[in-house]
Amino acid sequence: MVRRVIGIIGAIGSGKTTAARLLAEQLQAPLIIADDVARELAQPDGPLADALLRVFPGLERTAIAHRIFTDPQAMQALAAATDPPMIAELQRRLQQCAAPLVLVEGVNLPTLLPHLVDIWVEVITAEETALARAAAAHRWPPATIRACWRWQQAQPKPEPRHTIANDGDPAALRVAIAAFIAATLS
C-alpha cells in the first residue's frame, strides 16, 4: 500500500488547525498536529523541556516567543535544540500510522519533514484576521504576535502547494476543502 502524507502549513492565526481538522474529518484520515506533539515533548520530563532550559534558562514561554521571533540567532539556537527531537517524534508517529492517507499540521513542517510530505496545503487569511485570531488564542503581547506572523510569512514555502483560504466562514472553508479534495485527491 502506498501512503500519502498531506502537510498543512500556514502562519499563526491562519486557521490551519481548523482547516486540518475539517480536512481530516472529510477524508476520515488521521491527523498529527505538530504543536500538540511539541507540547507533549515540552512536559517537565520531555526532551524539549531540557532543550528549552538549556537555550533559554529562566525564560517563560511568552518571553521565549518574543525573543525567537525578533532575534534570528535565538531562532537558530531554538531550532538546533528542538528540531531533532521533533523530527524524530513526527517520523515515529508517521511510521506507526498504517492509514493510506495521513495529515500533518504545523507551521514549520517544510523544515522538519521536507521529504516526507507528498502534498502541501497552505491555509491563508488576511493579516488582520490572523493577528486577531492569534491574540485570542495566545497570551502574547501584540508586538510578539505581529513579529511571529511576519517571521512565518517570510519563510520559504514548499512548491508546488495548494492554498485554502480561511476567512472565518465555516461554510466557505468547507467548500474550499471539498474543492481541494475534488481537484487533488479524487
Image: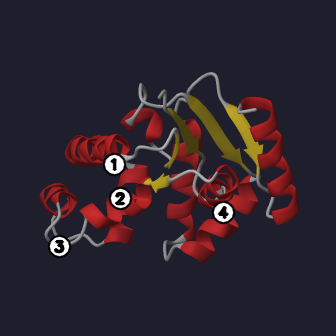
Mark carried by residue 37 = 2
Separation of residues labelled 4 and 2 (CA atoms): 23 Å
The percent coordinates of residue 120 (x first, y second) are 59, 33
The reply, left or right, for residue 110 in relation to residue 21 is left
Q: Are marks 1 and 2 in contact (CB under 8 Å)?
A: yes
* Vertical position of residue 101 compared to residue 59: above or below: above
Q: Which one is earlier in the sequence, the residue at label 4 or at label 2?
A: 2
Mark carried by residue 44 = 3
Q: Which one is earlier in the sequence, the residue at label 1 or at label 3?
A: 3
- Residue at the (37%, 37%) spot, across then down: 112
Give the residue number, with chain letter if any, for mark 1: 93
Q: Are marks 4 and 1 in contact (CB under 8 Å)?
A: no
Separation of residues labelled 2 and 3 (CA atoms): 14 Å
* Residue nearest the viewer, comparing 163 with 99: 99
SS of the residue at dot 3? loop
Separation of residues labelled 1 and 3 (CA atoms): 21 Å
Specify few, some or many for label 3: CA neighbours under 10 Å numbering under 14, 14-19, or 20 or more: few
Q: Which one is earlier in the sequence, the residue at label 1 or at label 2?
A: 2
Q: Quadrant of residue 43?
A: bottom left
Q: Nearer the viewer, mark 2 or mark 3?
A: 2
The percent coordinates of residue 131 (x first, y second) are 66, 63
Give the residue number, with chain letter if any, for mark 4: 131
* Residue nearest the viewer, comparing 66 with 52: 52
* Vertical position of residue 76 compared to residue 161: above or below: below
SS of the residue at dot 2? helix
- Residue at the (75%, 44%) spot, across then down: 164
